């Protein structure tokens, strides 16, 4: 018998050998004939690789008939024709020059770019959810309607609210829905209030929504600690104020501790509280907005309940409503009937069940694919798992805040922990260096940059939201990269101004692109051949 | 002729009963490269504090408030073709609009140039 003296498990790679990787200097100095760099393939525009003479599909010539185009027919749209493999490769090559949550950390503040569980995708692709049509008979889609109804009750439970409008298609659409409910409630009592108050720390879409809804927008200042100035708010409240729109946690990554006092004051003045729920991830399972006196709040299913932007579908912004607003919620919605069946409540049936609906936001029920993913996410996490989502997202953000506050100015760090996102300013950078230089250098380090120059109340803001799905190792790597870049910005390292140097394209001239945008392709040669397009995309 | 400034970083230059309005050098510096400006049409009446114009840079979009009330007599058409005028000459050729003062007493309470330049340093 032998006695093990080594307690550690043997390394799977005892010699530590790895294939060598090129060093930076070699890569940038060695041209290739094709312009490709091994696995990174240079890709021309579709117009440069396609031609009008070829096509990927083989249509029969059209038969003779009467045109009803009113003489608007054209012989050619001058669109490039490509074979199927050319088209597939074009988009696949371009996608490899892009960045995605499946590649790495995506620290865009206020976007909650968390991992999108594959279980969501499996469920969303079940034929009973994926291959149905809004116009097919409702008795054939009972499972889908039940799913919408179940998700609705989860959202009501998680927020402590009275009802929910499931149909809005994304955050700003949800805001509009909430404000339309508020307007309907005010009109029902004959109250023509005209002003919506929006604090400086709110999301930028809030004032846009209020203005779109016909209200006059007035700002409420922030305190030195980045919160709503309660006294300023109270002083402005009056009989002309319809609603206050508050983002909580706010865009400085801070919880509004006076939320209940704000709601009480707003209600006492006869107005309503709209809460922007874009940052719900920080408090899901921990705080119920209904307990804080919120009357309406949209929930970005594509943030808090995974499936971040581009994760396989569109957004979805259900709006939870208080008892005072729920009667005015839009049609249609999925309801359960006493016989156990589910039906969409439409105008024809609303008279008995929901007579005061303000109208419709969309043609049908909302975003089925997102509902399926969100309910899958909720059920696979459970109530305890969702609370841990909030805890871990806040822990990760605070880890970043405390790891970098010695090298980056953190304007609100003194006021205690942050919520799900950490905010830094460009204070202390060398003359001529700004947040944009840090963001571009992060690209060289292999990270998507954080949200920049927002919120406006922080100079050169860098808003970092890591989400709960990042490991400590990932966070440590990001922190090390950002620390090094911040030190270079403070020291005035001119090389930083050249970043990114490893991206497929160097730093773009955003000013020229905005001042002189080129929004359409102009074929440089009348015969359709390619002659290079530099002049048409000038400045690049 | 006299020059006044607001805490929202607009300037207003008064000649007779016509006031020319723009944004300060500090404001254009903070905004960065300006890519778009929307100015009011002649004939529009604005009250002191109203949103009168919009300025958009690569970093942010901001409202420009009317420092005083009156009827707009001219918007600076040159800004549509070349918004960079605001960066190059914010307190001169980069003006936004001119209006006919409705109430000259509204100028009271605005800062003069020296007071503004001092105040900006504290911001």
Image (spheres, coloured by chain):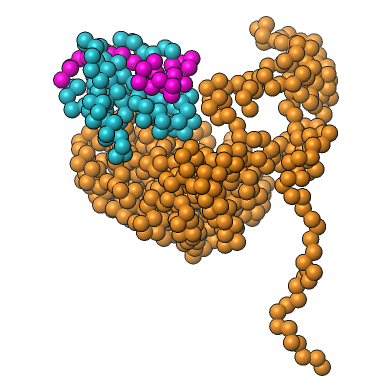
Q: State which quarter of the image contains the C terminus of chain A.
A: top right
Q: Please check the rendered image and state whether residue B100 is part of the magenta-colored stretch, yes or no.
A: yes
Q: Is residue A343 visible to the viewer in this orientation of the structure?
A: no
Residue A529 percent coordinates (x, y): 79, 17
Q: In which quarter of the image is residue A426?
A: top left
Q: State which quarter of the image contains the N terminus of chain A.
A: bottom right
Image-based side of A432 in relation to A100, left or right: left
Q: What stretch is highlighted in magenta?
A: B79-105
At x 76%, y 40%, the residue is A29
Residue A282, placed above or below residue B84: below
Q: Colour of chain B?
A: cyan
At x 49%, y 30%, the residue is B58
At x 57%, y 62%, the residue is A472
Q: Nearer the viewer, residue A419 or A78?
A: A419
Image-based side of B20 in relation to B108, left or right: right
Q: Colour of chain A?
A: orange
Q: In which quarter of the image is residue A418?
A: bottom left
Total label count?
Answer: 0
Q: Is residue B85 visible to the viewer in this orientation of the structure?
A: yes
Residue A193 percent coordinates (x, y): 25, 32
Residue A117 percent coordinates (x, y): 62, 54
Q: Nearer the viewer, residue B42 or B8?
A: B8
Q: Name the residue at the bottom extreme.
A: A1
Residue A33, placed above or below residue A67: below
At x 46%, y 26%, the residue is B34
């Amino acid at each position: 018998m032998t006695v093990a003296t080594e307690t550690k498990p043997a390394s799977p790679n005892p010699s530590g050998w790895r294939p060598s990787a090129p060093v930076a200097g070699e890569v940038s100095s060695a041209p290739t004939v094709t312009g490709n760099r091994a696995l990174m393939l240079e890709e021309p525009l579709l117009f440069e690789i396609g031609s009008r003479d070829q096509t990927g599909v083989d249509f029969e010539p059209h038969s003779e008939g009467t045109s009803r185009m009113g003489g608007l027919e054209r012989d050619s749209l001058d669109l490039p024709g490509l074979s199927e493999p050319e088209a597939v490769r074009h988009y696949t090559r371009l996608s490899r020059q892009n960045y995605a949550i499946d590649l790495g950390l995506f620290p865009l503040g206020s976007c909650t770019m968390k991992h999108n569980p594959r279980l969501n995708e499996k469920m969303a692709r079940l034929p009973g959810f994926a291959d149905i049509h809004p116009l097919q008979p409702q008795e054939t889609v009972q499972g889908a309607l039940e799913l919408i109804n179940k998700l609705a009750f989860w959202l009501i439970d998680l927020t402590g609210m009275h009802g929910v409008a499931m149909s809005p298609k994304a955050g700003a659409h949800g805001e509009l829905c909430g404000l339309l409910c508020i307007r309907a409630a005010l009109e029902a009592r004959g109250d023509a209030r005209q002003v919506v108050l929006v604090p400086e720390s709110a999301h930028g879409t809030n004032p846009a929504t209020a203005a779109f809804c016909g209200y006059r927008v007035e700002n409420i200042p922030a305190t030195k600690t980045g919160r709503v100035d309660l006294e300023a708010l109270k002083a402005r409240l009056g009989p002309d104020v319809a609603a206050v729109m508050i983002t909580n946690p706010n865009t400085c990554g801070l919880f509004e501790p006076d939320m209940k006092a704000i709601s009480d004051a707003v209600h006492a003045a006869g107005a309503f509280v709209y809460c922007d729920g874009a940052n719900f991830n920080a408090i899901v399972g921990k705080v119920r907005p209904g307990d804080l006196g919120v009357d309406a709040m949209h929930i970005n299913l594509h943030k808090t309940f995974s499936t971040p932007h581009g994760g396989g579908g569109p957004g979805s912004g259900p709006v939870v409503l208080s008892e005072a607003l729920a009667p005015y919620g839009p049609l249609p919605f999925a309801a359960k009937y006493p016989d156990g069946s589910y039906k969409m409540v439409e105008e024809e049936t609303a008279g008995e069940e929901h007579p005061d609906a303000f109208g419709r936001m969309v043609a049908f029920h909302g975003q089925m694919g997102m509902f399926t993913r969100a309910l899958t996410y909720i059920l696979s996490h459970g109530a305890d798992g969702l609370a841990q989502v909030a805890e871990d997202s806040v822990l990760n953000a605070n880890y970043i805040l405390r790891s970098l506050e010695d090298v980056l100015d953190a304007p609100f760090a003194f006021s205690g922990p942050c919520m799900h996102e950490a905010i830094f300013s460009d204070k202390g950078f060398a003359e001529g260096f700004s947040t944009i230089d840090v963001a571009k250098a992060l690209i060289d380090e292999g990270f998507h940059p954080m949200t920049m120059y927002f919120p406006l109340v922080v100079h050169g803001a860098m808003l970092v939201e890591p989400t709960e799905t990042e490991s400590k190792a990932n966070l440590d790597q990001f922190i090390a990269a950002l620390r090094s870049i911040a030190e270079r910005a403070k020291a005035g390292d001119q090389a930083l101004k050249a970043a990114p140097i490893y991206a497929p394209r160097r730093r773009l001239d955003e000013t020229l692109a905005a001042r002189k945008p080129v929004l359409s392709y102009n074929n440089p040669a009348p015969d359709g051949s390619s002659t290079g397009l530099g002049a048409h995309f000038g400045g690049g | 002729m006299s020059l006044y400034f607001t805490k929202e970083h607009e300037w207003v230059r008064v000649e007779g009963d016509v006031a020319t309005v723009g944004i300060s050098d500090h404001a254009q510096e903070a905004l960065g490269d300006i890519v778009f400006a929307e100015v009011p049409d002649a004939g529009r009446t604005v009250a002191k504090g109203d949103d009168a114009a919009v300025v958009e840079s690569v970093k942010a979009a901001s409202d420009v408030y009317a420092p005083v009330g009156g009827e707009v007599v001219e918007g600076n058409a040159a800004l549509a073709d070349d918004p960079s005028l605001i960066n190059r000459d914010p307190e001169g050729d980069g003006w936004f609009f001119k209006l006919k003062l409705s109430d000259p007493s509204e100028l009271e309470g605005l800062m003069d140039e020296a007071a503004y330049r001092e105040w900006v340093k504290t911001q």
